[in-house]
Image (cartoon, rainbow, N blue to C red):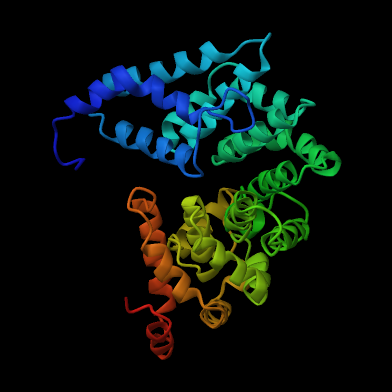
Amino acid sequence: KDLAIHDNSRTIYVVDNGLRKILKVVGQVPDLPSCLPLTDNTRMLASILISKLYDDLRCDPERDHFRKICEEYITGKFDPQDMDKNVIAIQTVSGILQGPFDLGNQLLGLKGVMEMMVALCGSEREVDQLVAVEALIHASTKLSRATFIITNGVSLLKEIYKTTKNEKIKIRTLVGLCKLGSAGGTDYALRQFAEGSTEKLAKQCRKWLCNASIDTRTRRWAVEGLAYLTLDADVKDDFVQDIPALQAMFELAKTSDKTVLYSVATTLVNCTNSYDVKEVIPELVQLAKFSKQHVPEEHPKDKKDFIDMRVKRLLKAGVTSALACMVKADSAILTDQTKELLARVFLALCDNPKDRGTIVAQGGGK
């Protein structure tokens, strides 16, 4: 539906009569016996649907009503006697965080939600750990939430990473650590972990990405980890030099599992530095220093020469054909945000006129 059309009566009808059913789909856990039949893309499409419905609401009372339905559904699932219900509740929050993030962030503020996530991480059941770690990954997008998890959950995540023999849990735990490690964004001075830790995490992600014996759904999480870690210039510089890892990521982007598109696009945006950078006004920097406020620092490897070198390496690895393939994805999965990221990457690749012939030769003209 075009959001320019102000009549949202159909959306209101779906919210009143169908939202609980959509939440049921979002909260499905494939490893539980009660799970409905799902494809690889079912839960993601349900998250997108929730996002579309939420975006079409026109006023605060409508949004409050939507939020209350979600709150009632999630809190209604919490049951100290039934762990399966608790897992479904957290999986539902996780699904909403992948849709309308503002709403998901409000739901994280519900009493017991964050605590339940951390508690499930410490469970002995692998399915509990799997869902909880995924939820923590989606929950730690805001720095304030990430700080809560760094304080309360990092030691738990590290313990799971060391002790679990399940590769699926191991890789998700690693991604959780990757995301928390990148909570400072591109700011060189706001590194969350010790020097060299993010490079070690990235090396493990690249190793999993290149391992063809691991299933596609699990390897997707390796790309997700790199999407966070490539905010660090040391990591992105190492990544573009690892041609097998780059090509493994491009091949993954061409598979039928299209849930990986956003992560691949984000990784490429980070590697080409095509994200928005705030203009630094020298007078404001001086003022911030005088008032003892934190001033973001640029990483030495984020300078123009390094960016140009990374672009050349990406082109050599065949990035253009992968991008051309990604652009042809189903319109429901290729969201506006993903399209924007892909456009930014194309723009960065075309920055040097000498590279444009290579881009056309690789299919970029299509």
Q: Which residue is pictured at 37% across the width and 77% down the height?
A: 364
- Residue 300 can be seen, yes or no: no
Q: Image height check: is 189 above or below 127? A: below
- Frontmost residue, 62 versus 171: 171
Q: Image height check: is 158 above or below 191? A: above
Residue 186 location in percent, x, y?
57, 58
Marks counted in the figure total 0
The N terminus - image quarter: top left
Residue 147 location in percent, x, y?
65, 37
Q: Which residue is pictured at 62% across the width and 38% down the height?
A: 134
Residue 26 location in percent, x, y?
48, 30
Is 219 displayed left or right of 104 in the figure?
Answer: right
**Picture quadrant where residue 317 is located:** bottom right
Is 333 displayed left or right of 209 in the figure?
Answer: left
The C terminus - image quarter: bottom left
Residue 361 location in percent, x, y?
40, 86
Q: Which residue is pictured at 50% across the width and 34% down the height?
A: 95
Q: Image height check: is 289 above or below 14? A: below
- Frontmost residue, 3 versus 216: 216
**Picture quadrant where residue 279 is located:** bottom left
- Residue 101 can be seen, yes or no: yes
Is 48 displayed left or right of 113 in the figure?
Answer: left
